[in-house]
Image: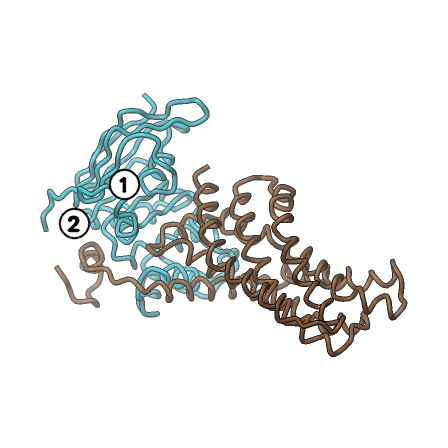
Chain colours: A cyan, B brown
């Protein structure tokens, strides 16, 4: 695996919200095998930055590149290689974890029911596959969303506060998955206020200074 | 780098991190969205009853409020049913993207590697199946209650069959544009009502023409043209509206 291959490059990003400059002249790149941690106090623009990178928010100024090509030109290819998990996970309370995962994956990849069940077992939802999500705890609902990490064969994970509502053991497991993903040639961009430990190299950018 | 699929733990991740990703086609994605929305609608079927009950109530109250005379009701029936169907659609329109917006499913929808307008079309189709089709199915009963000539029933049904999808499609633009607003309901009605008026005029006009013994092919063709036009244009506008709503 060419570990020095650059997946994502950001050049001279600029963003303002409500007449407040959140960041300007922001440059960074993410290589395969790397973890990029976005830091900063509340309201510093971490979520905004992640959404801009995903293409959910428009780019005011600057340029994003996916594998050296302008991101706007290869957006579908980029989305094929991206898994984004935001504050709001898109988990439907009226559906079970299995249905949620199935309908999320239906539009994206081919998965067998066995793979779906395995993914749910890995996030500790074994035995809850058929309970409606609204009856599960906040942490379990978050875990149901995290099960996507075990399905999607995508190189780039973008995780916004993925550790929210997850218990100690779950946090340790998630850290391990993130490290493993990076060590196997994937890349992760994440924000967290939690002390993050990883065996893979972690780059940092700090917003709001 | 491709490891055995069954090997556990890290090697599973290895497969995912490096394997070539095969995506389902755009039709499979659309069908997946339609099936998900139908399942969700089935789980929350009491929400669907609301516009339907409204539809029935308006039509049953009309003779009580205006006149129960047979000849008057027969001539007003098509118009009353059409207006009630339009208002019932408007009533449920806000729910088209609202829940998905609030729980984050809309963000995930935008990130599906398929053309967004086709995915939106899938959502609107599912929405029409659970809101428009029940209205059409109920309307013969209500039409007979209003003494509409039985021979005019097929014309009324066909006009609703062609017209209600147009209402859903046009409404999707308004719903997409206002989903990010906290109090978008009034704005949605103001945005959408002017665009509904041609559909209403042609819909009731078709039945009136048939009642007067005039040929209906012309206005039916017009309704069909409206439907085709809405099918090919509104998904783009609704998709653009969703992007704007998500970006704010």
Q: Residue at x 34, y 49 (%)?
A: A170
Chain assignment, label 2: A
Horizontally, is B183 left or right of A207 in the view? right
Q: Is residue B26 above or below residue B176?
A: below
User: In front here: A166 or B237?
Assistant: B237
Give the labeled residue for mark 1. Answer: A189
Is residue A82 visible in the rendered image? The answer is yes
Horizontally, is B43 left or right of A207 in the view? right
Task: Please check whether the numbered discs 2 and 1 fall on a single chain.
Answer: yes
User: In front here: B69 or A59?
Assistant: B69
Q: Is residue B248 above or below residue B84?
A: above
Quadrant of residue B178 within the rendered picture: top right
Residue B47 in the image: state x and y as whole percent. Answer: 63, 59
Quadrant placement of the C terminus of chain A: top left
Residue A39 in the image: state x and y as whole percent. Answer: 31, 31
How packed is label 2: few (under 14 Cα within 10 Å), some, or many (20 or more)?
A: many
Q: Residue at x 64, y 48 (%)?
A: B194
How packed is label 1: few (under 14 Cα within 10 Å), some, or many (20 or more)?
A: many
The disc placed on residue A185 is: 2
Count of labels in the image: 2
Callout 2 secondary element: loop
Is residue A199 visible in the rendered image? The answer is no
Horizontally, is B105 left or right of B208 in the view? left
Quadrant of residue A34 within the rendered picture: top left
Q: Do the residues bearing badges 2 and 1 touch, measured as CB atoms within 8 Å?
A: no
Residue A155 in the image: state x and y as whole percent. Answer: 23, 51
Whole-number angstrom distance, CA of label 2 to CA of label 1: 14 Å
Q: Residue at x 58, y 53 (%)?
A: B95
Residue B102 in the image: state x and y as whole percent. Answer: 51, 46
Callout 1 secondary element: strand
């Amino acid at each position: 695996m060419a570990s020095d291959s650059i997946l994502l490059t950001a050049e001279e990003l600029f963003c303002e919200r409500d007449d407040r400059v959140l960041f300007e002249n922001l440059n960074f790149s993410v290589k395969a095998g790397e973890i990029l941690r976005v830091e900063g106090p509340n309201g510093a623009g971490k979520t905004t930055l992640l959404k801009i990178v995903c293409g959910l928010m428009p780019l005011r100024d600057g340029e994003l590149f996916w594998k050296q090509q302008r991101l706007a030109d290869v957006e579908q290819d980029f989305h094929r290689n991206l898994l984004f998990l935001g504050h709001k996970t898109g988990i439907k309370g009226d559906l079970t974890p299995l249905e949620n995962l199935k309908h999320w994956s239906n539009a994206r990849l081919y998965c067998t029911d066995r793979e779906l069940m395995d993914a749910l077992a890995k996030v500790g939802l074994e035995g809850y596959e058929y309970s409606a999500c609204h009856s599960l705890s906040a942490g379990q609902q978050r875990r149901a969303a995290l099960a996507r990490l075990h399905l999607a064969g995508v190189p780039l994970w973008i995780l916004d506060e993925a550790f929210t509502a997850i218990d100690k053991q779950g946090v340790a497991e998630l850290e391990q998955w993130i490290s493993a993903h990076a060590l196997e040639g994937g890349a992760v961009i994440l924000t967290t206020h939690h002390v993050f430990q990883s065996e893979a190299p972690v780059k940092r950018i700090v917003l709001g200074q | 780098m491709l490891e055995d699929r069954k090997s556990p733990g890290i090697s599973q991740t290895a497969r995912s991190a490096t394997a070539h990703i095969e995506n389902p086609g755009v039709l499979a994605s659309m069908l997946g969205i339609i099936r998900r929305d139908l399942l969700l609608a089935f789980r929350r079927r009491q929400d669907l009853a609301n516009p339907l009950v409204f539809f029935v109530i308006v039509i049953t109250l009309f003779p009580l409020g205006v006149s129960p005379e047979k000849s008057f009701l027969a001539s007003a029936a098509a118009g009353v049913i059409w207006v009630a169907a339009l208002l019932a659609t408007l009533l449920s329109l806000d729910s088209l993207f609202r829940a998905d917006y609030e729980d984050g499913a809309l963000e995930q929808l935008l990130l599906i590697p398929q053309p967004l307008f086709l995915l939106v079309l899938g959502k609107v189709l599912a929405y029409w199946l659970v809101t428009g089709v029940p209205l059409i199915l109920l309307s013969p009963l209500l039409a007979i209650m209003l003494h509409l000539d039985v021979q005019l029933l097929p014309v009324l049904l066909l006009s609703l069959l062609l017209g209600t999808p147009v209402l859903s499609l046009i409404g999707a633009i308004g719903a997409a544009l206002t989903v990010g607003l906290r109090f978008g309901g009034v704005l949605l009605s103001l945005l959408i009502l002017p665009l509904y008026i041609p559909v209403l005029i042609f819909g009731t006009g078709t039945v009136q023409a048939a009642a007067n013994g005039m040929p209906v092919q012309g206005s039916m063709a017009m309704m069909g043209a409206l439907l085709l036009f809405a099918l090919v244009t509104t998904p783009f506008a609704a998709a653009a509206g969703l992007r704007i709503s998500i970006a704010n």
